[in-house]
Amino acid sequence: MVKTFADLLISAEADALCGAEYGKRSLERTNSRNGYRAREWDTRAGTVELAIPKLRTAATSLTGCCSVRR
C-alpha cells in the first residue's frame, strides 16, 4: 500500500513538471519522461522499491553538432 501511494504521488509530480499526463499530448508540455530510475526507500513498513521517472527537456538544440569545418 505504501508503494502504491508513493508511486501515485511521484507520477503526479512528474505530470505537473511535464505539463501533461503520462502518454498525453499537450501544447503546454515542457518535457517528457525518458525511462525510470530504480530507487529503494526505507520506511517503518520495510524497504520499498520505487520507480522514479527520468525527465528530459523536449526542445533540444542540435545547432553546430553536424557542421563541417574546413
Image (spheres, rainbow, N blue to C red):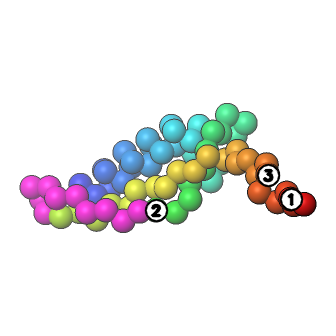
Return the residue at label 1: 69
Q: Is residue 57 above or below residue 68?
A: above
Q: Nearer the viewer, mark 2 or mark 3?
A: 3
Q: Residue at x 14, y 55 (%)?
A: 43
Say if residue 1 shows up in the picture. no
Sequence order check: which comes first, mark 2 or mark 3? Answer: 2
Q: CA distance from mark 2 to mark 1?
A: 38 Å
Q: What residue appears at the point 53 percent right and 51 percent down from the top-left corner?
A: 55
Labelled pair 2, 1 in contact (Cβ < 8 Å): no
Q: Residue at x 39, y 48 (%)?
A: 10
Give the camera-side residue of 55 and 24: 55
Comparing 17 with 65, the one in front is 65
Say which amino acid is labelled 3. Gly
In what element is the residue under mark 1? loop
> Dot 3 lies on which element?
loop
Q: How many marks?
A: 3
Q: Nearer the viewer, mark 3 or mark 1?
A: 1
Where's the C terminus, which quadrant?
bottom right
Q: Amino acid at mark 1?
A: Arg
Label 3 belongs to which residue?
Answer: 64
| Left or right, residue 7 beside residue 40 | right
Q: How far across and down, in percent of the image, does residue 62 sit? A: 76, 52
Q: Amino acid at mark 2?
A: Tyr
Comes first in the chain, label 3 or label 1? 3
Q: 48 left or right of 38?
A: left
Left or right side of 28 for 51: left
Residue 36 marker: 2
Q: Residues within 10 Å of mark 2 (few under 14, many from 20)?
A: few
Q: Position of residue 48 (x, y in %)?
A: 23, 62
Decide: is 28 above or below 24: above
Q: Which residues are magenta?
A: 37-46
